Image: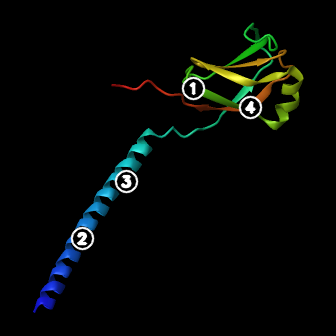
Amino acid sequence: MKFIALVTHLKQVAQAAKAYTDSLISETAKETIKAIKEMDRAKVDKISAVAVTISTDGWVEDETWEEYPMRYDITAADVTATDRADIILSPNSLTAAMDCGVCQTCETQTGKICIWAKKATAEALTAEYRIIQGEKPKED
């Protein structure tokens, strides 16, 4: 009789442990889904390329960089100073870009992307830019 009672008790303990484990798994799954939804909400917007032509006119003298005295501003309406821009020159513009000494660094400012060169380009350059959004101030 004691053996049957022991087996019955062990079955009850196993069932209770299974129910407890199931509840933990369920809670973990719910928290995982919440975390995934939060990551989707907070993730960086998809980056898309914008085609641009860097013309021969529009270059201005600028004393920001001694080595690169000419600046060209690419209008980009939604850009802020906290954003980052990647500018990719098209292969057919690389020679002209090297000839005028385009700096490999650019700077974002409100509404524009600034590039520098040793001299204004002799022919229009084709490129595309991608904006990586900078950190926005947190709302309280």
Residue type (three-letter) at the residue carrying disc 2: Ala
Number of the label disc, if any, that sits on residue 127:
4
Q: Is residue 48 left or right of residue 106?
A: left
C-alpha separation, residue under disc 4 versus residue under disc 1:
19 Å
> Mark 4 and mark 2 in contact (Cβ < 8 Å)?
no
Number of the label disc, if any, that sits on residue 83:
1
Q: Earlier in the sequence, mark 3 or mark 2?
A: 2
C-alpha separation, residue under disc 3 versus residue under disc 2:
22 Å
Q: Earlier in the sequence, mark 2 or mark 1?
A: 2
Viewer-nearest of discs 1 and 3: 3
Which of the pair 33/49 is nearer the observer? Answer: 33
Residue type (three-letter) at the residue carrying disc 4: Ala
SS under mark 1: loop
Q: Is residue 78 left or right of residue 6?
A: right
Q: Residue at x 51, y 38 (%)?
A: 45
Expressed as whole percent of the image width and height from the top left, the position of residue 133 reads: 54, 30
Residue type (three-letter) at the residue carrying disc 1: Asp
C-alpha separation, residue under disc 1 versus residue under disc 3:
31 Å
> Mark 2 and mark 3 in contact (Cβ < 8 Å)?
no
Mark 2 = which residue?
Answer: 17
Mark 3 = which residue?
Answer: 32
Q: Earlier in the sequence, mark 3 or mark 4?
A: 3
